[in-house]
Image (cartoon, rainbow, N blue to C red):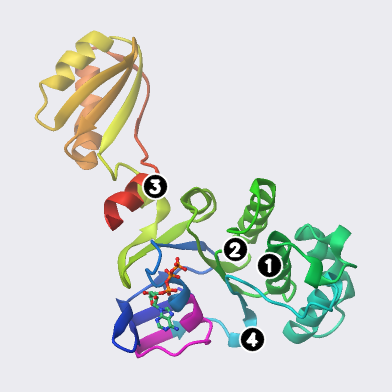
């Protein structure tokens, strides 16, 4: 684990923004922090970044502070500097040495090469967000903390930023907060779901999604759908069988574990020819609503 917190609690006056939060972030993964407004995502990232102090609890960092880079939700820069000057300044602060080629490459990666000579006072919100991302990337950090990195971007810009983040997997660890669940589902390996300052779920995204909302299987048969439907309906671990087409079935089950253990034998027993069967993955949006409502 590269970042862990233990019993992390933050009070703002009498208001509890974080309550005994324990997160465990594996090295070199992309970790998504999601939660409704006011859940505590920004507070948690700011504490990890060393920008706010926790009221109590512990942070265990497996990386030196100078190897961390932070992108706040609304990055701000001196408006009279050009984009290139901003990134060059960040490069010199984060990793001095020969920075010129790194600055140019980062400007290209962030989609700002054409605007690099313009003063950032004239940048749009999306461009400022890309510039912020460029500043976090240019020092080649081991840990990136990104607060809503894609929220101000148009679909094409979001696509580029998500691709940039995905390319970091395996090289650096990224902890990103986001409201856009589709982005998290696309780019993150692990997630932490916060609500009212409490961590409701943490773990691998696939273990969260598979069979979570209503445990279900999708079965595709070459033949024997009718006898399979009949045989499945008589099982006590099967809640319902819905034929989707002539040879595709949707199966609601009591638990995935029971289905995993019994389904192959039931299908083999009734002579059905199976093309595929797999647990149905829920959408992060469904699971999120289920957990946070
Ligand atoms: N400086 C502050 N002083 C007082 N209360 C604060 C402060 N910062 C945050 N809070 C409160 O703490 C709670 C958590 O806020 P935080 O900004 O961390 O949540 P968030 O999940 O990032 O929300 P959002 O998605 O809206 O950005 C909220 O109730 C917020 O009003």
Task: Using the image as rendered, state which of residue 292 and residue 237 is in the foreground.
Answer: 292
Q: Earlier in the sequence, mark 1 or mark 2?
A: 1
Residue 126 vs residue 87: left or right?
left
Indicate which disc residue 212 carries. Answer: none
Q: CA distance from mark 4 to mark 1?
A: 17 Å
User: The N terminus is located in which quarter?
Assistant: bottom left
- Look at the numbered disc 4 and say if its residue's Cβ is closer than 8 Å to ligand 1: no
Q: Earlier in the sequence, mark 3 or mark 2?
A: 2
Inspect this view and state whether residue 270 appears: no
Task: Using the image as rendered, state which of residue 193 and residue 79 is in the foreground.
Answer: 79
Answer whether labels 4 and 2 touch (C-beta < 8 Å). Answer: no
The residue located at (50%, 56%) in the rendering is: 188
Judged from the image, the secondary structure of the residue bearing numbered disc 1 is helix
Q: CA distance from mark 4 to mark 3?
A: 35 Å
State the residue position of label 1.
Answer: 133
State the residue position of label 2.
Answer: 149
Answer whether labels 1 and 2 touch (C-beta < 8 Å). Answer: yes
Answer whether labels 1 and 3 touch (C-beta < 8 Å). Answer: no
User: Which range is magenta?
Assistant: 45-59
Q: CA distance from mark 1 to mark 3?
A: 26 Å
Residue 228 drawn at (x, y percent): 22, 15
Image quarter for residue 292? Answer: bottom left
State the residue position of label 4.
Answer: 66
């Amino acid at each position: 684990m590269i970042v862990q917190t233990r019993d992390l609690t933050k009070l703002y006056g009498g208001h509890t923004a974080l309550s005994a939060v324990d997160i465990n972030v594996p090295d070199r993964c992309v970790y998504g922090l999601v939660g409704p407004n006011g859940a505590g995502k920004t507070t948690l990232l700011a504490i990890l970044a060393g920008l706010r102090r926790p009221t109590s609890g512990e942070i265990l960092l497996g990386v030196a502070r100078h190897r961390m880079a932070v992108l706040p939700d609304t990055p701000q820069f001196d408006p009279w500097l050009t984009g290139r000057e901003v990134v060059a300044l960040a490069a010199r602060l984060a990793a001095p040495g020969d920075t010129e080629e790194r600055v140019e490459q980062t400007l290209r990666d962030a989609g700002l090469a054409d605007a690099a000579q313009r003063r950032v006072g004239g940048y749009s919100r999306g461009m400022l967000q890309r510039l912020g991302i460029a500043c976090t990337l240019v020092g080649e950090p081991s840990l990136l903390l990104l607060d809503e990195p894609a929220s101000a971007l148009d679909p094409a810009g979001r696509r580029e930023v998500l691709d940039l983040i995905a390319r970091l997997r395996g090289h650096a660890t990224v902890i990103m907060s986001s409201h856009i669940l589709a982005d998290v589902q696309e780019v993150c390996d692990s997630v932490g779901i916060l609500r009212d300052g409490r961590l409701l779920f943490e773990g691998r995204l696939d273990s969260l999604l598979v069979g979570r909302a209503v445990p279900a299987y999708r079965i595709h048969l070459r033949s024997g759908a009718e006898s399979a439907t009949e045989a499945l309906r008589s099982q006590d671990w099967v809640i319902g069988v819905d034929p989707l087409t002539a040879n595709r079935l949707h199966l609601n089950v009591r638990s995935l574990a029971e289905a995993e253990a019994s389904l192959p034998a039931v299908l083999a027993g009734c002579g059905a020819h199976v093309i595929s069967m797999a647990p149905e993955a829920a959408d992060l949006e469904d699971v999120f609503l289920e957990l946070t409502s």
